């Protein structure tokens, strides 16, 4: 199903963020659709256990003939949220389509790492119970085997969630570096899709903005990547309008990347500074700008970034041909340009050089 690509209102983002920072008593946030945006309709506090509140508080928040997306906190830990899609049979067909196609947009905007509880869809009161949700989880665990590509994507997402969960509390509390106001503003612009490229550096103990822009269709990414300095890059790539209908039917319309670009000739001190701050910058970006990423990638040459475009075409994607061993790694490893016919060049972790 095509995604609706609705904007998530600032109120929803702020309330969700506040719940992570100190609102441990918040049990749920109810989201609806108004004027092509996902807006907050209601929030409710914790009364009892997650099981009891699911059957009472959440059930009461679901209106009989009105679809909604309900963010339900499974416990007091920030990452353990569940997205409940309440789409009753009595609501309009258009609403059914809009709400069904907006779930991923909502989770990605708020941060995939928070939704350890997964998704649960219900269309009648009999299913809107904790027992029904747990039965659904058990059923999914016994589902059909995943394809190699599905396994790779699932494991990559799970590992990325773990990385964010481990580092988010540290990043939100005491960042090892300050973040400039311009950088934080660029994160919000990226989340709202005003820009699709944000380039950052760590200098003078501060995460600083290098550049931000809206990428043009077909623009050379290689020309934008520094061959001399390490950079963090947030990037959103959209599929070409000339893509065949067959490819488009199974290909996402866009993918977001968090890229750590670290050329081999970068001094070791800069490599260490950027490498050690990567997880904190990623977690802080998700907390401040509420940005979630589909891929977390490291590259060692400007040419490597062009290979990420293939993620929008599964028939050419390096993921489609990945081995089962590659499926266990945290980061996607793009093929170097010009490497065809000579095997896949490995993106190597940096090796300390002599100039400290």
Image (cartoon, rainbow, N blue to C red):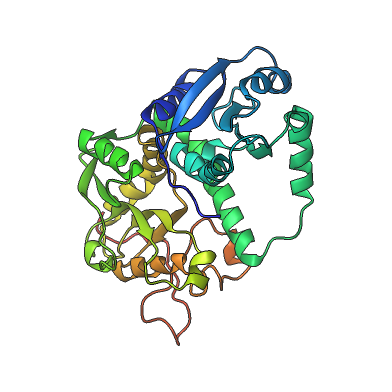
Closest to the observer, 261 or 176: 261
Residue at left 47%, top 44%?
105
Residue at left 60%, top 22%?
76
Relative horizontal placement of residue 189, taking residue 258 as reference (left or right)? left
Relative horizontal placement of residue 96, taking residue 215 as reference (left or right)? right
On screen, 21 above or below 301? above
Relative horizontal placement of residue 354, taking residue 170 as reference (left or right)? left
On screen, 245 above or below 174? below
Q: Position of residue 154 (x, y in %)?
A: 60, 54
Number of marks: 0
Residue at left 78%, top 42%?
138
Q: On the rendered image, what quadrant is the C terminus found in?
A: bottom left
Q: Position of residue 168 (x, y in %)?
A: 46, 34
Please say whether residue 92 is visible from this viewpoint: yes
Please say whether residue 226 is visible from this viewpoint: no
Q: On the rendered image, what quadrant is the N terminus found in?
A: bottom right
Which quadrant would residue 220 be assigned to in this image?
A: bottom left
Residue at left 48%, top 71%?
245
On screen, 326 above or below 90? below
């Amino acid at each position: 199903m095509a995604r609706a690509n609705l904007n998530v209102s600032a109120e929803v983002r702020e309330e969700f963020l506040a719940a992570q920072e100190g609102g441990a008593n918040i049990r749920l946030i109810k989201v609806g659709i108004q004027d092509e945006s996902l807006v907050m309709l209601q929030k409710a506090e914790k009364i009892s256990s997650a099981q009891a509140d699911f059957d009472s508080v959440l059930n009461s928040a679901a209106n009989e003939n009105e679809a909604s997306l309900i963010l339900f906190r499974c416990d007091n830990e920030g990452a353990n949220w569940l997205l409940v899609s309440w789409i009753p049979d009595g609501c309009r067909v258009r609403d059914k389509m809009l709400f069904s196609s907006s779930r991923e947009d909502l989770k990605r905007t708020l941060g995939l790492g928070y939704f350890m509880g997964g998704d649960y869809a219900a269309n009648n009161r009999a299913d809107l119970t904790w027992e029904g949700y747990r039965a659904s989880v058990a059923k999914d665990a016994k589902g059909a085997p995943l394809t190699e590509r599905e396994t790779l994507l699932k494991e990559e997402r799970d590992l990325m969630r773990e990385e964010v969960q481990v580092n988010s509390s540290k990043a939100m509390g005491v960042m090892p570096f300050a973040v400039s106001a311009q950088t934080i503003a660029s994160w919000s612009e990226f989340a709202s899709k005003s820009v699709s490229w944000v380039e950052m550096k760590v200098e003078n103990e501060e995460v600083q903005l290098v550049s931000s822009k809206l990428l043009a269709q077909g623009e050379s990414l290689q020309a934008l990547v520094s061959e001399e300095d390490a950079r963090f890059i947030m990037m959103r790539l959209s599929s070409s309008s000339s893509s065949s209908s067959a490819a488009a039917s199974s290909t996402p319309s866009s993918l977001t990347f968090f890229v750590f670009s670290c050329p081999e000739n970068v001094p070791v001190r800069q490599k260490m500074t950027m490498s050690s701050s990567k997880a904190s910058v990623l977690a802080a970006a998700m907390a401040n700008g509420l940005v979630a990423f589909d891929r977390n990638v490291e590259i060692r040459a400007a040419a490597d970034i062009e290979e990420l475009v293939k993620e929008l075409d599964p028939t050419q994607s390096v993921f489609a041909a990945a081995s089962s061993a590659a499926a266990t790694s945290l980061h996607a490893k793009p093929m170097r340009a010009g490497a065809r016919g000579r095997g896949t060049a490995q993106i190597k972790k940096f090796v300390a050089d002599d100039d400290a």
